[in-house]
Structures are given as structure tokens and as C-alpha cells.
Amino acid sequence: MFRAFLKVADKCPHCCEELYHHRADDFPAYLVIVIVGHILVPIVLTVETEIAPAIWISMTLWPSLALVMTLGLLQPVKGAVVAIQWYGGMHGFEASKKARALAAAADVG
Ligand SMILES: [Zn+2]
């Protein structure tokens, strides 16, 4: 669903579902900050108090780990935010949600 690292494609290349309606904005970045912080801070505190590595190790390890975790999580979290908006029929996805509901009703009835 991405045409670049964080650019959502205008529509799905498989089913042509329109995706340009999404309004993820900065929310994925906020979520990634919360997730990475909650994972990394306890690890940093534990390692720094229990092991107390050399300062150069701390100054290279923690920023590198934060960068890798942030870059690794940004795209999946943005995909999840867009998926939640799509599933909930938020913003421009209302028509898509109604079409899915009609198709499901036609399958049942
Ligand atoms: Zn699709």
C-alpha cells in the first residue's frame, strides 16, 4: 500500500481500493514515539544501572537502537493507522465501507 517509504499509494495495486482518503498525518509518528519509548527506556535504565557500560558504548548504542526501532516501526504503524481508518469508514472511506456492507449483505441474502 506504499509507493515510497511513508507515501501511501493512491489505490491498492491488487484490488484497486482507493487509499488516498487516509488522514494519518502525524499520528503514526506519535505512536512510534510512545512504543519505542516504552520499550527502550526500561532497557536503558536497567542496562545503565546494572552493567554501567563505558560512556562511548552508551552514546552509540542507545541512539542507534532508537533510530533502528523508529525506522523499523514507522511504516507498519502508518499502515495500521490507515487500515483502522479504512475499516472504520473514517474520513473519505465512508463510501468504501458502505460498499463492503452492501456486498456482505448481498452475499448473505
Ligand atoms: Zn487491496
Image: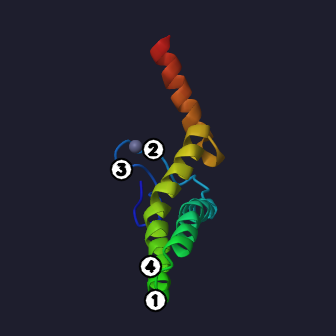
- In the displayed structure image, the side of residue 65 where residue 96 appears, left or right: right
Contact check, label 3 and label 1, Cβ < 8 Å: no
Q: Residue at x 52, y 57 (%)?
A: 78
Does the rendering let one see residue 41? Answer: yes
Question: Relative to the observer, which residue lies in front, 48 or 72?
Answer: 48
The first of marks 4 and 2 along the sequence is 2
User: In the rendered image, which residue does mark 2 sit on?
Assistant: 17
Helix, strand or loop for disc 4: helix
**Which residue is pictured at 51% across the width and 56% down the height?**
77
Q: So how many labels did they put on this image? A: 4
Circle 2 packing at 10 Å, graded few (<14), some (14-19), many (20+), is some
Measured in 3D between alpha carbons, the distance from the residue under mark 2 to the one under mark 1, in whole angstroms, is 49 Å
* Residue sticking out furthest to the top: 109
Q: Are marks 2 and 3 in contact (CB under 8 Å)?
A: no
> Which amino acid type is shown beneath numbered disc 2?
Glu
Position in image of residue 108 (x %, y %): 48, 13
Q: Residues within 10 Å of mark 4 (few under 14, many from 20)?
A: few
Ligand 1 quarter of the rendering: top left
Observer-side mark, 3 or 1, equals 1
Q: Give how far apart the Cα atoms at labels 4 and 2 are.
A: 42 Å
Question: Which is nearer the N-term, disc 2 or disc 1?
Answer: 2
Residue 100 is situated, as x and y percent measured from the top left of the image, at 52, 30
Q: Which mark is residue 31?
A: none
Label 2 CB less than 8 angstroms from ligand 1:
yes
Label 3 vs label 4, nearer the camera? 4
Residue 56 badge = 1
Is the distance from the Cβ of mark 3 to the nearest ligand 1 atom less than 8 Å? Answer: yes
Residue annotated with mark 4: 61
